[in-house]
Image: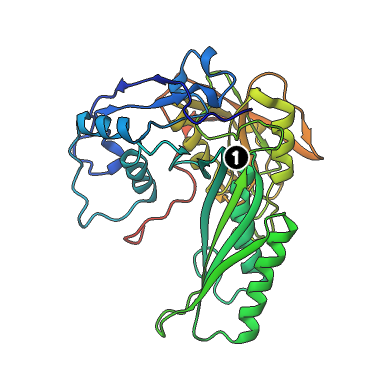
Amino acid sequence: MSTTSSPSQVDCSRRVRCSRSPGNNSLMQSRCCWTSRIVADSWSNQATKSSRPCRGRRIGTPGWSSMNSTASTRRKCPLPPTENVPMDESAIISHIIKSTDILPKPIIIGPGDDLGMIVSNGMKLLAGVDQVIEGRHVKIGEEPEKIGYKAMARSLSDVAAMAARPLGSLATAAIPGSWDQDKTIRLCDALRETAYRFEAPLFGGDIAVLAADQEHLVVTVTVLAEPPSSGRLVTTRRGAVEGDGIYMTGMLGGTIDDDGGGDHLEFTPRIKQALELSSILEERLHSMIDLSDGLGVDLKSIAQLSELSAVIDANSLPIRDDVTIEQAIQSGEEYELLFSATGDVPDHVLDLPITRIGTFITDHAIGSIMLENDGPVRDISNLGWQHRTGGQ
C-alpha cells in the first residue's frame, strides 16, 4: 500500500457528555466534553466503506494547523482533585490519552496502544518501551539471564500484539551497587541474545549505577518495528466490531506456579503467529492485544477503545488443568494473543491452538466484560493487574 504525504481525511467530531459519579474522585469518572478525531482514509483499504470511521483501526491525526485551531475551540471539563489521591495506572493512562488526542500529523498511532507509529519520509516506524523492576516484575535476587530474557521478550510481545515485524531494540539498565562485573555482563548478554533470537538486534543503550539506598535493578527496553512486509497495516486495539468473535492463542494460567504464584519468566513472544494470523485473516482481523495484565483488564482495553462490551463463555476458556478460573482470569503475563475477528478463524496457527472465548456486543456499558458461567453473570473487566500507589 502506498503512503501519501497528505492523506484525505474525514472529520468525525462527536460530542461526549461530561459525567462524574457523585462522591467519586477517580479520573476514570471524568470525561472530556468534546473530542475531535480525524480518520485518514488512505491508511485503510476499507476506510471509505466504513459506516463508523471514528472507530476504525487506523486513526490518523491532523496537522499542526488544524491541531492548533481544534485545541483552542474545545470545551474543557474540570477534572476531579488529584492531590493526595493514590496513583491508579488506568486513570493515568486515561488522562494521557485524553490530553494527547490531538497530535502532529506524522504520528499515526498515539498513546493507548501497544506501540506508537510515526511516518517519516514515507516509512512507517513503530516504537514501544517497557520496563522490568526487580521486586515488582521479577523476584529479588533472580538470575540476570532470566531478567534479561523477560525484559526483552515482554517488549517484543508488544510487537506481536500489533502483528508487526521487529527491526531492532535499545536497552537501559540501572544496576544496584551490590552487583559485580560478572552479573552485569550476564544481564547484557541475555538482553543481546534474546534480541537476536527474535530478530530485533540490540544496537544501543545505557548503563547507570543506582544510589546506595536503591538496590532493585531496573531494566528498560525500547523496541522498533515495521508493518508486515505484505503491505498490510498493523492491528490495533481500537478496531473491534459488534459481533466479532473473541479469540486467544495458547492457554490461561500457563505461567502460574504450583503454589499459586508465578515467576512469569518462561514465555515466547508470539511474533510469528501474529504475522501468520495477519496474513490469513487480512482485513477480517479487527483488533489485538497481548495478554499481559490479565484477561479481564486486557479485553477491557479493546472494548473501551472500540466502544463495545463483551460476553465471555467461562466453559470455553482454555485453562490449565490445575488452575482455577479465578487464577486464570487474573494471572496475566501469559503473553498470548487476544484478538477479535469476523468470519472463519483457524483452530491453530503455526501449531499453536486458537480458541474462541466470546463475542463483542453492545448490550452492556462500554468496557464491560461479562463472564457467563454456571452462576450469575458478572463483570470481570477489573480483574487483573494494575499498578497503584497507597498500598493498593
Foreground residue among 318 and 154? 154
Q: Residue drawn 46% across and 16% down?
A: 52
Image location of residue 48, percent across then percent down: 52, 14
Residue 304 location (% of width, % of height): 43, 32
> Relative to the observer, which residue lies in front, 84 or 181?
181
17 left or right, relative to 304: left
User: Does the image show residue 263?
Assistant: no
At x 52% / y 35%, what residue is drawn?
237
Q: Nearer the viewer, residue 27 or 170?
A: 170
Give how far across and how far down residue 220 sits, in percent: 52, 63
| Image quadrant where residue 183 sits | bottom right
For label 1, the crowd category at 10 Å Cα-Cα, with few meaning under 14, some 14 to 19 and many 20 or more, is many
The image quadrant where one finds the C terminus is bottom left
Instruction: Look at mark 1 in the image and give the residue it sits on.
Output: 162
Q: Disc 1 residue type?
A: Met
Lateral position of residue 127 relative to residue 164, left or right: left
The residue positioned 67% from the left and 42% from the top of the image is 319
The picture quadrant where one finds residue 347 is top right
Instruction: Answer with the quarter of the image where residue 79 lies.
Output: top left
Residue extending farthest right: 351
Q: Is residue 50 visible?
A: yes
